[in-house]
Amino acid sequence: GESVGLHLPTLSVQEGDNSIINCAYSNSASDYFIWYKQESGKGPQFIIDIRSNMDKRQGQRVTVLLNKTVKHLSLQIAATQPGDSAVYFCAENINDMRFGAGTRLTVKP
Amino acid sequence: DGGITQSPKYLFRKEGQNVTLSCEQNLNHDAMYWYRQDPGQGLRLIYYSQIVNDFQKGDIAEGYSVSREKKESFPLTVTSAQKNPTAFYLCASSTGQGFSYEQYFGPGTRLTVT
């Protein structure tokens, strides 16, 4: 099956800055997308999801953007905090859920 | 508190032994899933169950077995036939049947086989 990919494996930002984590997907039939946060040694934690009939969805300090034209998904984190340091990965639903390998976000104080 | 529990957190076994990983949820979710996570890779689906007494193979089911006798429990057995069993195993559940629903994950079990 097709898999979800990521543009960058690591991202380092200054505390207080905004973070943008990107994800490319290859299956135009995918209809549901999720962003997860995973801290070291723990299970993934749901951040935000979006369905293919939407372009943008906002949560608390997070925004997900979906560009179906170029098959691109992004997660924006506003005012990044040290507690945001983790691996972030996206997942797409086709017939089952496909997960990307993740981007490691490091927040510098 | 509602959630998914996995036990134990760390598990060590000798090669050739079968081992069973526990997964319990009190969220009243119909669907449950088992994934394997290896360093630098995305989660890979081992087995899933959308209803009690029914389950389907995922992408990497060889060397694994599951049962779903109760709605809240979905144990995974890693058999001696699994050629590379050392990994981080994650259990998840979701409200709906099918994959278009948010999956809630447990804390994971790290299995080391030597």
Image: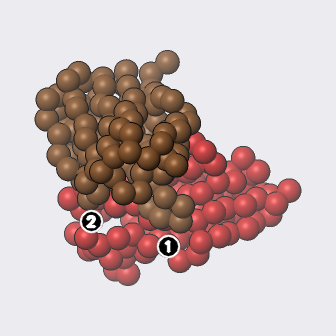
For marks 1 and 2, the one nearer the N-term is 1
Relative image position of residue A21 (x, y in whole percent) = 57, 67
Where residue B1 appears, x then y in whole percent? 49, 18
List the residue tagged with mark 2: A30
Front position in the image: A76 or B19: B19
Figure chain in red: A
- How busy is the neighbourhood of tag 2: few (under 14 within 10 Å), some, or many (20 plus)? many
For numbered disc 1, what is the local secondary structure? loop
Nearer to me, A99 or A30: A99
Q: Residue at x 20, y 50 (%)?
A: B57
Q: In what element is the residue under mark 2?
A: loop
Instruction: From the image, tell me which residue sits under label 1.
Output: A6
Amino acid type at mark 2: Ser
Q: Amino acid at mark 1?
A: Leu
State which chain is coloured brown.
Answer: B
Applied colour scheme? by chain
Q: Report in which chain the residue with disc 1 lies.
A: A
Mark 1 burial class by Cα count in 10 Å: few <14, some 14-19, many 20+: many
Question: In this rendering, is residue B51 above or below A50?
Answer: above
x, y percentage for residue A33?
Answer: 37, 58
